[in-house]
Amino acid sequence: QPGPERSRATDRPLVIAHRGASGYRPEHTLEAYRLAIRMGADYIEPDLVSTKDGQLVARHENEISGTTDVAARPEFAARRATKTIDGVAVTGWFTEDFTLAELKTLRAQERLPQVRVANTAFDGRFEVPTLQEVIDLARAESRNRGRAIGIYPETKHPSYFASIGLPLEEPLVTVLRANRLTHRNDPVIIQSFETANLRKLDKMIDVKLAQLMDASGRPYDFTVAGDPRTYADLASAAGLRWIASYADGVGAHKNLIVPRDAAGKLLAPTTLVRDAHRAGLVVHAWTFRAENQFLPADFRIGADPNARGDVTAEYELFLGLGLDG
Ligand code: G3P
Ligand code: CA
Protein backbone atom coordinates (compact mmCIF):
# COMPACT_ATOMS: atom_id res chain seq x y z
CA GLN A 1 0.00 0.00 0.00
CA PRO A 2 1.36 3.43 -0.87
CA GLY A 3 2.03 5.43 2.27
CA PRO A 4 0.28 8.67 3.18
CA GLU A 5 3.58 10.51 3.31
CA ARG A 6 2.59 13.50 1.24
CA SER A 7 -0.71 15.34 1.57
CA ARG A 8 -2.28 16.62 -1.60
CA ALA A 9 -2.71 20.37 -1.68
CA THR A 10 -6.43 20.06 -1.04
CA ASP A 11 -6.07 17.61 1.83
CA ARG A 12 -5.88 18.38 5.49
CA PRO A 13 -2.32 18.42 6.82
CA LEU A 14 -0.55 15.14 7.40
CA VAL A 15 -0.82 14.31 11.08
CA ILE A 16 2.10 12.54 12.76
CA ALA A 17 1.32 11.59 16.34
CA HIS A 18 4.34 12.69 18.33
CA ARG A 19 5.14 9.84 20.76
CA GLY A 20 1.53 8.70 20.23
CA ALA A 21 -1.39 10.61 21.72
CA SER A 22 0.99 11.53 24.49
CA GLY A 23 -1.33 14.10 26.03
CA TYR A 24 -3.84 11.35 26.78
CA ARG A 25 -1.76 8.29 27.57
CA PRO A 26 1.83 7.85 28.79
CA GLU A 27 4.03 8.44 25.75
CA HIS A 28 5.49 5.64 23.66
CA THR A 29 3.04 2.97 24.78
CA LEU A 30 0.86 0.88 22.47
CA GLU A 31 -2.12 2.49 24.14
CA ALA A 32 -0.86 6.00 23.25
CA TYR A 33 -0.23 4.98 19.64
CA ARG A 34 -3.60 3.21 19.33
CA LEU A 35 -5.47 6.23 20.65
CA ALA A 36 -3.58 8.51 18.24
CA ILE A 37 -4.69 6.35 15.31
CA ARG A 38 -8.26 6.43 16.55
CA MET A 39 -7.99 10.23 16.74
CA GLY A 40 -7.03 10.33 13.07
CA ALA A 41 -3.23 10.25 12.95
CA ASP A 42 -1.68 9.21 9.65
CA TYR A 43 1.62 8.18 11.23
CA ILE A 44 2.69 7.19 14.72
CA GLU A 45 6.13 8.17 15.96
CA PRO A 46 8.24 5.74 18.02
CA ASP A 47 11.58 7.04 19.27
CA LEU A 48 13.94 4.06 19.29
CA VAL A 49 16.69 2.98 21.68
CA SER A 50 18.43 -0.38 22.18
CA THR A 51 18.26 -2.99 24.91
CA LYS A 52 21.30 -4.93 26.15
CA ASP A 53 20.45 -7.72 23.72
CA GLY A 54 20.14 -5.40 20.75
CA GLN A 55 16.36 -5.16 20.57
CA LEU A 56 14.78 -1.85 19.60
CA VAL A 57 12.20 -0.45 21.99
CA ALA A 58 10.19 2.76 22.00
CA ARG A 59 11.48 5.32 24.52
CA HIS A 60 12.41 8.92 23.97
CA GLU A 61 15.56 8.43 26.01
CA ASN A 62 17.65 5.42 26.91
CA GLU A 63 17.57 6.76 30.49
CA ILE A 64 14.21 5.50 31.72
CA SER A 65 13.69 6.65 35.31
CA GLY A 66 11.21 9.31 34.16
CA THR A 67 9.14 7.10 31.87
CA THR A 68 9.06 3.77 33.73
CA ASP A 69 8.81 2.48 37.28
CA VAL A 70 12.42 1.27 37.26
CA ALA A 71 13.47 3.50 40.18
CA ALA A 72 10.91 1.75 42.40
CA ARG A 73 12.20 -1.73 41.54
CA PRO A 74 14.70 -2.83 44.22
CA GLU A 75 16.03 -5.69 42.10
CA PHE A 76 17.40 -3.13 39.63
CA ALA A 77 18.76 -0.62 42.16
CA ALA A 78 22.38 -1.57 41.48
CA ARG A 79 22.03 -0.72 37.81
CA ARG A 80 21.77 2.99 38.48
CA ALA A 81 24.69 4.63 36.71
CA THR A 82 26.07 7.90 35.40
CA LYS A 83 26.99 8.04 31.73
CA THR A 84 27.96 10.65 29.19
CA ILE A 85 25.44 10.71 26.35
CA ASP A 86 26.27 13.08 23.48
CA GLY A 87 28.52 15.09 25.79
CA VAL A 88 26.01 15.37 28.64
CA ALA A 89 26.33 13.54 31.97
CA VAL A 90 23.14 11.59 32.70
CA THR A 91 22.35 9.62 35.88
CA GLY A 92 19.71 6.92 36.09
CA TRP A 93 18.83 3.58 34.54
CA PHE A 94 19.59 2.87 30.90
CA THR A 95 17.88 0.57 28.40
CA GLU A 96 21.21 -0.79 27.23
CA ASP A 97 21.73 -2.31 30.71
CA PHE A 98 18.50 -4.33 30.52
CA THR A 99 17.61 -7.31 28.37
CA LEU A 100 14.32 -7.08 26.59
CA ALA A 101 12.89 -9.66 28.98
CA GLU A 102 13.89 -7.50 31.94
CA LEU A 103 12.60 -4.34 30.32
CA LYS A 104 9.27 -6.03 29.71
CA THR A 105 8.82 -6.41 33.46
CA LEU A 106 8.84 -2.61 33.84
CA ARG A 107 5.74 -0.49 33.46
CA ALA A 108 5.42 2.87 31.78
CA GLN A 109 4.63 6.00 33.69
CA GLU A 110 3.79 9.57 32.74
CA ARG A 111 6.88 11.66 31.96
CA LEU A 112 5.23 14.99 32.87
CA PRO A 113 2.97 14.19 35.84
CA GLN A 114 2.64 17.86 36.82
CA VAL A 115 1.36 18.83 33.36
CA ARG A 116 -0.55 15.73 32.33
CA VAL A 117 -2.12 14.91 35.64
CA ALA A 118 -4.83 12.68 34.17
CA ASN A 119 -2.24 10.45 32.55
CA THR A 120 -0.90 9.41 35.93
CA ALA A 121 -4.01 7.22 36.29
CA PHE A 122 -2.37 4.93 33.72
CA ASP A 123 0.94 4.67 35.55
CA GLY A 124 1.97 1.07 36.10
CA ARG A 125 -0.42 -0.38 33.52
CA PHE A 126 1.38 -0.36 30.18
CA GLU A 127 4.51 -2.05 28.86
CA VAL A 128 7.45 -0.61 27.00
CA PRO A 129 6.74 -1.68 23.40
CA THR A 130 9.19 -3.10 20.92
CA LEU A 131 9.45 -1.75 17.39
CA GLN A 132 7.89 -5.00 16.19
CA GLU A 133 4.87 -4.45 18.41
CA VAL A 134 4.49 -0.91 17.07
CA ILE A 135 4.55 -2.24 13.49
CA ASP A 136 2.05 -4.97 14.40
CA LEU A 137 -0.27 -2.33 15.85
CA ALA A 138 0.00 -0.08 12.80
CA ARG A 139 -0.74 -3.02 10.51
CA ALA A 140 -3.71 -4.23 12.54
CA GLU A 141 -5.16 -0.72 12.71
CA SER A 142 -4.55 -0.23 8.98
CA ARG A 143 -6.58 -3.36 8.28
CA ASN A 144 -9.33 -2.42 10.72
CA ARG A 145 -9.65 1.13 9.42
CA GLY A 146 -9.06 0.58 5.74
CA ARG A 147 -6.34 3.21 5.54
CA ALA A 148 -2.57 3.00 5.73
CA ILE A 149 -1.16 3.93 9.12
CA GLY A 150 2.51 4.76 8.77
CA ILE A 151 5.35 4.54 11.25
CA TYR A 152 7.84 7.36 11.71
CA PRO A 153 10.67 5.88 13.78
CA GLU A 154 13.43 8.09 15.16
CA THR A 155 16.84 6.67 15.98
CA LYS A 156 17.90 8.16 19.31
CA HIS A 157 21.59 8.73 20.06
CA PRO A 158 22.81 6.42 17.26
CA SER A 159 26.49 7.32 17.55
CA TYR A 160 26.35 6.74 21.31
CA PHE A 161 24.78 3.32 20.79
CA ALA A 162 27.38 2.47 18.14
CA SER A 163 30.12 3.45 20.61
CA ILE A 164 28.90 0.84 23.11
CA GLY A 165 28.60 -1.91 20.49
CA LEU A 166 24.85 -1.65 20.02
CA PRO A 167 24.41 0.14 16.68
CA LEU A 168 20.79 0.97 15.91
CA GLU A 169 20.91 0.75 12.13
CA GLU A 170 21.30 -3.03 11.76
CA PRO A 171 18.42 -4.08 14.04
CA LEU A 172 16.21 -1.37 12.55
CA VAL A 173 16.84 -2.57 9.01
CA THR A 174 16.44 -6.20 10.11
CA VAL A 175 13.02 -5.54 11.62
CA LEU A 176 11.86 -3.52 8.62
CA ARG A 177 13.03 -6.23 6.22
CA ALA A 178 11.33 -8.94 8.27
CA ASN A 179 8.12 -6.94 7.88
CA ARG A 180 8.72 -6.30 4.17
CA LEU A 181 8.93 -2.57 4.78
CA THR A 182 11.80 -1.96 2.44
CA HIS A 183 10.46 0.17 -0.37
CA ARG A 184 10.17 3.92 -0.57
CA ASN A 185 6.43 3.62 -1.18
CA ASP A 186 6.00 1.72 2.08
CA PRO A 187 4.49 3.76 4.93
CA VAL A 188 7.76 4.27 6.80
CA ILE A 189 9.85 7.40 7.31
CA ILE A 190 13.00 7.11 9.42
CA GLN A 191 14.15 10.31 11.11
CA SER A 192 17.33 11.23 12.96
CA PHE A 193 19.23 14.27 14.18
CA GLU A 194 22.48 12.58 13.21
CA THR A 195 23.50 12.97 9.59
CA ALA A 196 25.90 10.00 9.66
CA ASN A 197 23.11 7.71 10.86
CA LEU A 198 20.83 8.65 7.97
CA ARG A 199 23.63 8.44 5.43
CA LYS A 200 24.41 4.94 6.67
CA LEU A 201 20.74 3.94 6.49
CA ASP A 202 20.50 5.40 2.98
CA LYS A 203 23.01 2.78 1.87
CA MET A 204 21.24 -0.04 3.71
CA ILE A 205 17.55 0.35 2.83
CA ASP A 206 15.32 2.22 0.39
CA VAL A 207 12.64 3.60 2.74
CA LYS A 208 12.15 7.35 3.09
CA LEU A 209 14.48 9.29 5.40
CA ALA A 210 14.04 12.65 7.15
CA GLN A 211 16.85 14.80 8.54
CA LEU A 212 15.87 16.34 11.86
CA MET A 213 17.01 19.86 12.67
CA ASP A 214 16.64 21.69 15.93
CA ALA A 215 16.68 25.42 16.56
CA SER A 216 18.95 25.46 19.58
CA GLY A 217 22.02 26.67 17.73
CA ARG A 218 24.00 23.60 18.71
CA PRO A 219 26.38 22.03 16.19
CA TYR A 220 24.48 19.58 14.04
CA ASP A 221 27.21 16.98 14.11
CA PHE A 222 27.90 17.08 17.82
CA THR A 223 29.81 13.84 17.54
CA VAL A 224 32.70 15.71 15.89
CA ALA A 225 34.50 17.78 18.51
CA GLY A 226 35.05 21.36 17.48
CA ASP A 227 32.78 21.27 14.43
CA PRO A 228 31.07 24.68 14.51
CA ARG A 229 28.36 23.96 11.94
CA THR A 230 24.87 24.29 13.38
CA TYR A 231 21.46 23.09 12.28
CA ALA A 232 20.88 26.60 10.96
CA ASP A 233 23.73 25.97 8.52
CA LEU A 234 22.13 22.69 7.58
CA ALA A 235 18.86 24.60 6.95
CA SER A 236 20.52 26.88 4.36
CA ALA A 237 19.79 26.35 0.66
CA ALA A 238 23.18 24.67 0.23
CA GLY A 239 22.67 22.54 3.34
CA LEU A 240 19.27 21.40 2.10
CA ARG A 241 20.68 20.45 -1.29
CA TRP A 242 23.24 18.30 0.51
CA ILE A 243 20.52 16.68 2.62
CA ALA A 244 18.66 15.81 -0.58
CA SER A 245 21.63 13.60 -1.55
CA TYR A 246 20.66 11.10 1.17
CA ALA A 247 17.19 12.00 2.51
CA ASP A 248 13.67 12.67 1.29
CA GLY A 249 12.62 15.30 3.78
CA VAL A 250 13.55 17.48 6.70
CA GLY A 251 12.00 17.42 10.15
CA ALA A 252 12.59 21.02 11.07
CA HIS A 253 11.86 22.62 14.40
CA LYS A 254 9.08 25.10 13.74
CA ASN A 255 11.25 28.05 14.81
CA LEU A 256 13.50 27.34 11.83
CA ILE A 257 10.45 27.91 9.61
CA VAL A 258 8.75 30.78 11.43
CA PRO A 259 11.24 32.28 13.90
CA ARG A 260 10.35 34.17 17.05
CA ASP A 261 11.84 37.22 18.67
CA ALA A 262 13.05 37.26 22.27
CA ALA A 263 9.50 37.95 23.48
CA GLY A 264 8.16 34.93 21.59
CA LYS A 265 6.46 36.99 18.88
CA LEU A 266 6.34 35.25 15.50
CA LEU A 267 8.52 36.83 12.84
CA ALA A 268 8.46 36.53 9.04
CA PRO A 269 8.92 32.98 7.74
CA THR A 270 12.36 31.95 6.61
CA THR A 271 13.00 30.52 3.15
CA LEU A 272 13.47 27.02 4.55
CA VAL A 273 10.26 25.54 3.12
CA ARG A 274 10.82 27.08 -0.31
CA ASP A 275 14.48 26.03 -0.36
CA ALA A 276 13.62 22.52 0.83
CA HIS A 277 10.96 22.12 -1.85
CA ARG A 278 13.39 23.38 -4.48
CA ALA A 279 15.84 20.73 -3.30
CA GLY A 280 13.08 18.11 -3.66
CA LEU A 281 12.57 17.63 0.08
CA VAL A 282 9.28 17.45 1.96
CA VAL A 283 9.06 19.44 5.20
CA HIS A 284 7.68 18.05 8.45
CA ALA A 285 7.64 20.66 11.18
CA TRP A 286 7.72 19.88 14.89
CA THR A 287 6.43 20.11 17.57
CA PHE A 288 3.12 21.87 18.15
CA ARG A 289 2.17 22.30 21.78
CA ALA A 290 0.31 25.01 23.63
CA GLU A 291 0.20 27.06 20.47
CA ASN A 292 -2.34 27.60 17.75
CA GLN A 293 -0.61 30.07 15.48
CA PHE A 294 -0.17 27.52 12.73
CA LEU A 295 -3.63 26.00 12.81
CA PRO A 296 -7.01 27.25 11.58
CA ALA A 297 -9.52 27.79 14.36
CA ASP A 298 -11.75 24.97 13.11
CA PHE A 299 -8.93 22.47 12.78
CA ARG A 300 -10.00 19.04 14.04
CA ILE A 301 -8.12 15.79 14.31
CA GLY A 302 -10.26 12.94 13.03
CA ALA A 303 -13.63 12.62 14.64
CA ASP A 304 -12.55 13.46 18.16
CA PRO A 305 -14.57 16.52 19.22
CA ASN A 306 -12.00 17.27 21.90
CA ALA A 307 -9.07 17.44 19.51
CA ARG A 308 -9.35 21.06 18.53
CA GLY A 309 -7.33 23.64 16.72
CA ASP A 310 -6.47 25.31 19.98
CA VAL A 311 -3.74 22.81 20.61
CA THR A 312 -2.84 22.66 24.26
CA ALA A 313 -0.01 21.21 26.24
CA GLU A 314 -2.12 18.09 26.45
CA TYR A 315 -1.89 17.36 22.78
CA GLU A 316 1.27 17.01 20.79
CA LEU A 317 1.54 16.67 17.08
CA PHE A 318 3.56 17.88 14.23
CA LEU A 319 2.33 18.52 10.78
CA GLY A 320 3.52 17.98 7.26
CA LEU A 321 3.09 21.57 6.17
CA GLY A 322 2.14 22.25 2.61
CA LEU A 323 3.57 25.75 2.79
CA ASP A 324 5.27 27.24 -0.21
CA GLY A 325 7.44 29.93 1.23
O1 G3P B 1 10.36 14.47 14.77
C1 G3P B 1 10.70 15.50 15.60
C2 G3P B 1 10.74 15.15 16.99
O2 G3P B 1 10.41 13.83 17.22
C3 G3P B 1 12.03 15.45 17.63
O3 G3P B 1 11.75 15.74 18.92
O4 G3P B 1 10.46 14.79 20.75
O5 G3P B 1 12.14 13.38 19.68
O6 G3P B 1 12.85 15.31 21.01
P1 G3P B 1 11.80 14.74 20.13
CA1 CA C 1 11.09 11.94 18.27
Image (cartoon, grey):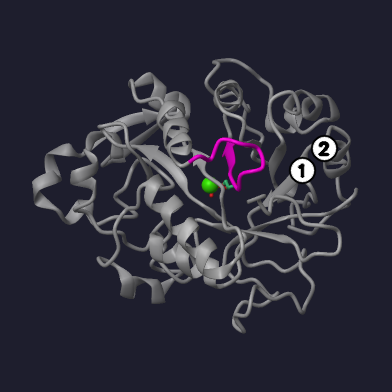
Residue 238, position as x, y percentages in the image: 83, 24
Residue 9, position as x, y percentages in the image: 86, 59
Would residue 109 appear left or right of 319 to someone viewing this image? Answer: left
Foreground of the two, 168 or 161: 168
Determine the residue positioned at 29% across, 34% down. Answer: 96
Would residue 297 appear left or right of 300 to someone viewing this image? Answer: right
Would you say residue 185 sits in the magenta stretch? yes
Q: Amino acid at mark 1?
A: Val
Would you say residue 294 sits in the magenta stretch? no
Residue 76 visible in the snapshot: yes
Up-down: is 245 above or below 26? above
Residue 237, position as x, y percentages in the image: 85, 30
Determine the residue positioned at 25% across, 32% down. Answer: 53
**What kind of secondary structure does the magenta stretch mostly adopt?**
loop
Foreground of the two, 49 or 180: 180
Residue that numbered label 2 is attached to:
276
Residue 314 visible in the snapshot: no
- The answer to whether the beta carbon of the residue marked 2 is less than 8 Å from any atom of ligand 1 is no
Classed neighbour count for the residue bearing mark 1: other residues with Cα under 10 Å, few (<14), some (14–19), many (≥20): many
**Stretch in magenta:** 180-192
